[in-house]
Amino acid sequence: MSAPLPDLDRLHFTREQMRAVDRAAIEEYEIPGVVLMENASLALADACTRMIGNAAEPKVLILAGPGNNGGDGFALARHLHNRGASPITLHCVPKAAYKGDAAINLAIIERMGLPLHTLEEAPDLNSLCPEPAIIVDAIFGTGLDRPIAGPIAGLIRAANAIRARAETRTLLLAVDIPSGLDCDSGDPVGDSEIVIRADQTVTLAGRMIGFRNPDAAAYLGEVSVGDIGAPRELLTRFGELH
């Protein structure tokens, strides 16, 4: 009889270990990347639904970065719209820069006619989406390994400022990890002022090793693990039990 598998919520991953999980899920188990992204977006939608509560047609501002985190944000917009929310998505790079699964989900919400804006078109978040119920940080994920600069740094500052205003009561949800936080160390990648300060973080597939850093709690908020459908055998193969 085989030994029981450990509690998945206790597994932690480095950046490279999580990349290995994604790669093996796609290459060994032949799970299409777009399926993993769809599962991730459903986990995010469930978290948003819990955060929104009973609000009628709540506004959700989604900040979509240049990679798969942005793709998660695009797919999330579709699910939130279908659940009766009013998502507004801001993408941080031109549409042509999105490739693969992210481009697929961007094309879907374009065809749905959901509100889409570029960072250059709508630099003022207050005008773009006054008093959102939630701001979703889908800018950078676990791959970030250098300081954030330029317009995206300003975007992070603006999102944190909206969250900090007591009168808005806006909550901030981070996808995978707050943008600007290093997933291996749990410290800011650069300036500590250019890190998302989340109320909740939905980390996809498993917790990152940097989350164990006590200083990371100020950025993470409440942490939950979103199931993306990766086989648990992969998670136990690559993760570290803590």
Image (cartoon, rainbow, N blue to C red):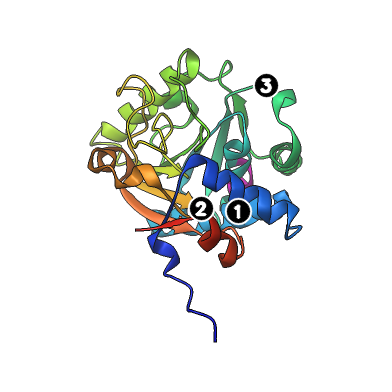
Of residue 153 and residue 21, the one placed in the foreground of this image is 21
Q: Which residue is mark 3?
A: 94
Q: Earlier in the sequence, mark 1 or mark 2?
A: 2
Q: CA distance from mark 1 to mark 2?
A: 9 Å
**Mark 3 Cα within 10 Å, few/some/many (few <14, many 20+)?**
few
What residue does disc 2 label?
A: 44
Could you say which is closer to the camera, residue 191 or residue 48?
191
In the rendered image, residue 141, in percent from the top left (x then y), is placed at 51, 37
How far is disc 3 from disc 2 in space, using C-alphas? 24 Å
Q: Which residues are magenta?
A: 74-79
Checking the image for residue 79, the label placed there is 1
User: Residue 200: x, y in percent?
Assistant: 36, 48
> In the shown orientation, is residue 147 left or right of residue 199?
right
At horizontal 33% and vertical 43% (from top left) the residue drawn is 220
Is residue 75 part of the magenta span, yes or no? Answer: yes
The amino acid marked with disc number 1 is His
Earlier in the chain: of badge 3 and badge 2, it is: 2
